[in-house]
Image: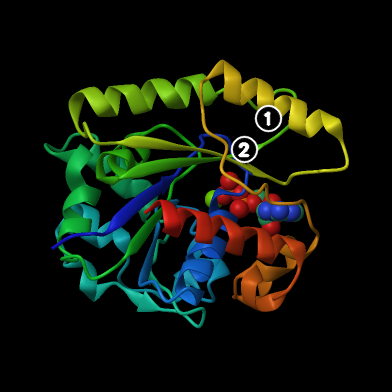
């Protein structure tokens, strides 16, 4: 009985709002009554920190699940935003190196998700800014990949490489993986430039665009320091509403 949808939020470029998207979409899903688990796959632990948990206070984290076989339930935390979290610490950097020589490394996240036994409607994977072993393991565990993209002239550099990786994952470790599309983030709707860049990328790579775009807003910068997602700190801003609309579209698609 597994209707769990697993989304890998991936782009090897940093600063495109992967972590913000995971926290905000996750909270938006929870508002819709969905059971949500967020997974921090970045050794920088920004997702963990932004949901009010100080990685320095943690004895156990995802690193112990991926490399030491600890049950995921022993490291999970609940958050004030109504979502559960598998937290990360800087130790995850070492896990990445350890995994490189391990058999079955592509499957470590898939097997972690399988151990959850369909207890969640959504599992969102916050990928690190690389196409290394953790991102490949995330794609191997995923139902769909969602690519946050800042619509600037050079932002498509790297999309091709990410899609090549998706291709390899489909060939070798996860035949079912679907690309759900690009999510325009840090979007400046006042310029026609942003829309033109988005259209070019979507045509060049034959990618669906997930609507609506997430507007650029200073309010996003404030949320992580509060340890809550923007859906709570800035409840009815355009940015929060945009993430709610995306969540609704994804639930309907589900
Ligand atoms: P990534 O995980 O891809 O590295 P982050 O989610 O950490 O990206 O976001 C990078 C920075 O951009 C953060 O400081 C974040 O607060 C900010 N940010 C994210 N989304 C928006 C937005 N829609 N408008 C303005 N700033 C944003
Ligand atoms: Mg991040």
Label 1: which secondary element:
helix
- Does 43 sit above or below residue 145? below
Q: Nearer the viewer, residue 59 or 165?
A: 165
Residue 62 percent across, percent down from the top left: 31, 61
Label 1, on which residue?
198
User: Residue drawn at (48%, 59%), measured in percent from left and top?
Assistant: 45
Q: Is residue 147 left or right of residue 150?
A: left
Instruction: Say if disc 1 is inside 8 Å of ligand 1.
Output: no
Residue 149 numbered mark, or none: 2
Report whether residue 53 is seen. Answer: no
Furthest residue to the front? Answer: 252
Q: Is residue 72 left or right of residue 226?
A: left
Label 2: which secondary element:
strand
User: Residue drawn at (64%, 77%), measured in percent from left and top?
Assistant: 232
Furthest residue to the top? Answer: 204
Q: Are marks 1 and 2 in contact (CB under 8 Å)?
A: yes
User: Residue drawn at (46%, 73%), measured in percent from left and top?
Assistant: 30
Query: Which marked residue is nearer to the observer: mark 1 or mark 2?
Result: 1
Q: Residues within 10 Å of mark 1 (few under 14, many from 20)?
A: many
Q: Is residue 234 left or right of residue 175?
A: right
Quadrant location of residue 204?
top right
Q: CA distance from mark 1 to mark 2?
A: 9 Å
Report whether residue 11 is seen. Answer: yes
């Amino acid at each position: 009985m597994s209707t769990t949808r697993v989304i890998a939020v991936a782009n090897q470029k940093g600063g495109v709002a992967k972590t913000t998207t995971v926290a905000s979409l996750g909270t938006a899903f929870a508002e819709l009554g969905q059971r949500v688990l967020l997974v921090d796959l970045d050794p920088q632990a920004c997702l963990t920190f932004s949901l009010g948990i100080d990685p320095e206070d943690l004895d156990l984290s995802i690193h112990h699940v991926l490399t030491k076989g600890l049950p995921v339930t022993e490291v999970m935390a609940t958050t004030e935003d109504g979502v559960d979290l598998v937290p990360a610490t800087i130790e995850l950097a070492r896990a990445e190196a350890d995994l490189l020589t391990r058999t079955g490394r592509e499957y470590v996240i898939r097997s972690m998700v399988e151990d959850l036994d369909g207890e969640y409607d959504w599992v969102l994977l916050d990928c690190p800014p690389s196409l290394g072993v953790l991102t490949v393991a995330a794609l191997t565990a995923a139902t769909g990949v969602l690519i946050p993209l800042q619509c600037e002239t050079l932002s498509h550099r790297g999309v091709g490489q990410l899609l090549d990786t998706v291709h390899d994952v489909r060939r070798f470790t996860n035949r079912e993986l679907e690309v759900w599309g690009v999510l325009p983030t840090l979007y400046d709707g006042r310029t026609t430039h942003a829309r033109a860049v988005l259209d070019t990328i979507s045509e060049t790579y034959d990618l669906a665009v997930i609507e609506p775009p997430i507007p650029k807003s200073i309010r996003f910068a404030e949320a992580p320091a509060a340890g809550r997602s923007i859906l709570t700190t800035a409840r009815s801003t355009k940015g929060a509403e945009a993430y709610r609309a995306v969540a609704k579209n994804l639930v309907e698609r589900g």
